[in-house]
Image: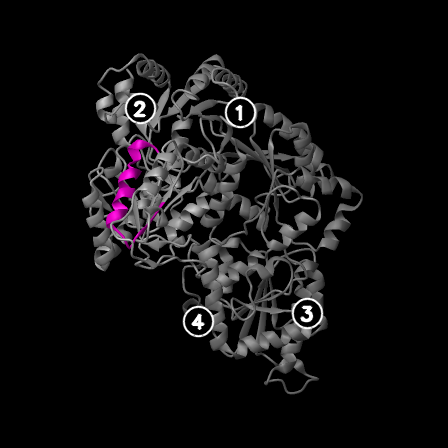
Amino acid sequence: MKKPRVLIFSLAYFPLVGGAEIAVKEITDRLASPTSVSPDVTSGELGAPTHSGVGVDFDLVTLRFNKKHLPKEKIGNINVFRVKGSKLFFPLKSLFLARKLHKQNNYKVVWSIMTAYAGFGVLFFKILNPKVKFLLTLQEGDSEKHILKRVGIFYPLWKYIFKKADYIQVISNYLADFAKKYGAKCPIEVVPNGVNLDKFKTPYFAKATQGKQNSNTKTIITTSRLVYKNGVDILIRSMAMLKAKSPDSKAIEDPRQGRDYKLIIVGDGPDRSKLEQLTKDLSVDDIVQFVGHVDPNEIPNYLYKADVFVRASRSEGLGNSFLEAMAAGLPVIGTSVGGIVDFLKDGETGFLVEPENIESLTNKIDWVLSNQDISKEVALNGKNLIFKNYSWDGISEKIGKIFKKNIVNIRLLLATGIYPPDIGGPATYAKLLVDELPKRGVSIDVVFYGDKGVSRSIPKGIRHIVFFFKCFFKAIKSDVVLVQDTISAGLPALLASRLARRRFLIRVPGDYVWEQSVQRFGVKDSIDDFQNKKYGFKVEFLRSIQKFVVSNADVVITPSNYFKDLVKTWVKDKNKVITIYNGIDIATSDKRQATRNSKTIVSVGRLVPWKGFDMVIEMMIDLPDWKLVIIGDGPEYNNLKSQISLLRPPSAQGYDVAQQGSEGQANYPSIKLGAGKLQDRVILTGAILREKVLEYLANSEVFVLNTSFESFSYQIVEAMAMGIPVVTTNIGNISEIVRDGIDGVLVEPNDKDGYINVIKKINNNFEFRNSLIKSAIERSKDFSIERTLNSLVLVLKR
């Protein structure tokens, strides 16, 4: 598959270097290659990503400031195209070139670096190409007043840039508020610029000592473009005050005798001559050194020789120079403006002063240099912060996720029988795909029974025809149709996909015909025996439809290797049947609240005969001091309710262990254990929201699932992830999830005594219980959402 392309608009680019240009190069160098994972999706196992790329090719349109600059060249991973002319005409000239390139490359995203000249060019392009996503990055460091003055009469058009953007990435919270203030309605994400940490691996305090010839001279450094906003003039005036404080000065009238302080100014800009004159006027030209422009790779060599970094900014979008100084281990002094406050916390990671306050700045420099122990501790905190949160690898990964949200590689139609608020594995899986696939470059549309226009109140037959037409019209706009039902959704979706000439994938979460045969047609055989026997007309008719749908799929996805082997018997081409394990949110383990001896058993699932809830309820007679919560709905609900009301324990004596309103506990109904009927301590919750399910799990001591068939159990993995000991049956694919005696305990279906003995052992044996919990939490990570989605996306792309 051809990689998607992104077109970048930037007024300037290498060899003209600034913070924005460095950011673009660092990010694109890392994002051009796709994330690499193990290609073996048939096993359900994926390796870890080897690098953070998203598989994007980049082109960039910029201004040709100098004739020596080539009109076209490749820099890093970017094809750079330069247009002639002045800044004023850059928006129109970049637009004309961009339209020409778009015809050749079909860009998925246009990316504007700042709003000024580049932003206008992208705005015009977006108006003419509304389907192309517009990503806006704000790196502006000038003050709001200066920006508005520069925009001038173009203010309404400039403000329209914010409204037309589909996604905005800003380098500080200050710029996020700025974007909202001027009309941004799209998602806004703060992703700061990073630091090339490889340049700062040598410990600062060791290297700094090497470059000092006179330890009595305190070296102050600033790395800065010499413009008004960076406040270099304020720092120079502060140097005059510091020089006057020098203990070596003979008199205030003769301040030239002081030699305790030295200022190194690294950088160039239009204000240099003014600043050099200022040093002469203040008689500090002997302690202030103008280094001029320095290659970015050489800046660490200057930082390592200094004692403190200072920048008296009047405005700042973020301040890359601060980040580099902190990475070098220097104590850093800045002003409380713009994005500086995102990372510079006074007395924690650096030191803050008021902007434009020369005396405050002077006193702070003097204090930092006089209190070395505290300054070094703060500097170390700052360095740790940068190494943790501001590496280009980490920043690029975050930007990569933004691209994944905005670059659509595949348009997917998902056809499913059930969808939330319905409960069950297919509904949970469908919602997972809707939430997560767009982040991976897959746009997704959904058709389901109960959706608008496909009401379940419509008579059967007609309802299926409506479902077919809805699938067909959506399939025309899609690249792939994925269905996760073999008959009611599967047949209409298959016909629609073939008519629309789209690839058809089916996810088979269970044997629908066997399930219906058990519930409606009196079949008693296990699912394995069912595959090899013949039954009545209705069963065989449904089976023929199911096999027809599955056989005509381009790819068949099963949730376990056990079920993959079963489904292979339905098709001629067995190679198209693959396994992708279901994924769950493994982050739920932090919801665990229950203390040991809560003596609550939880079981979750659809209330159907093969889930064996009747045995679990009967088991409670022999566990008189326990309570049971069964979560779910289904055709067996009334039968189970009747069973609970009719069963009575042998003893009617008990005690009240209700947990109502206690901190960190769920509010269960008051339960008299052992008293009266079983219904006093067995709860059927019916269908409830997932958050409530997690709440019950968090307050349970054991999870039980007495099932005689599972293609894959979300509930088991979720309980493992939350640290709830699992007791379940040794059937189907469950042994692929739970290793007996390690991650949980497996018993035979309906072995009541076996369940009771294991539950008591978990309750009484602390060491055994804790071993199961620890192992289960680690095991659940093998069934993470990330692994599932990576596998599915690879299949979709294939």
Which residue is disc 1 drawn over? 455
Measure the alpha-carbon separation of dots 4 and 3: 28 Å
| Residue 570 shows up from this direction | yes
The amino acid type, in three-letter code, at marker 2 is: Val
Q: Neighbour class for label 4 at 10 Å: few (<14), some, many (≥20)?
A: some
Q: Which residue is mark 4?
A: 209
Where is mark 2, residue-wise?
A: 577
Return the disc, 2 or 4, that comes first in the chain's sequence. Answer: 4
Label 4 amino acid? Answer: Thr
Q: Amino acid at mark 3?
A: Thr
Foreground disc of the pair 3, 1: 1
Where in the figure is residue 430, as x and y percent of width and height?
44, 33
Q: Secondary structure at mark 2?
A: strand
Whether the residues at callouts 4 and 3 have beta carbons within 8 Å, the answer is no
Camera-near label (2 vs 4) is: 2
175 relative to 503 in the view: left or right: right
Q: Which residues are magenta?
A: 608-629
Q: Is residue 30 above or below residue 268?
A: above
Question: Mark 1 packing: few (<14 Cα in 10 Å), some, or many (20+)?
Answer: some
Image quadrant for the C terminus?
Answer: top left
Mark 2 or mark 1, which has the lower sequence index? 1
Residue receiving disc 3: 279
**Secondary structure found at label 1:** loop
The residue mark sitting in front, 4 or 3, is 4
Residue found at x 45% / y 14%: 495
Q: Tell which circle, 4 or 3, labels the residue nearer the N-terminal end.
A: 4
* Dots 2, 1 in contact, CB < 8 A: no
The Cα atoms of the two marked residues, 3 and 1, are separated by: 80 Å
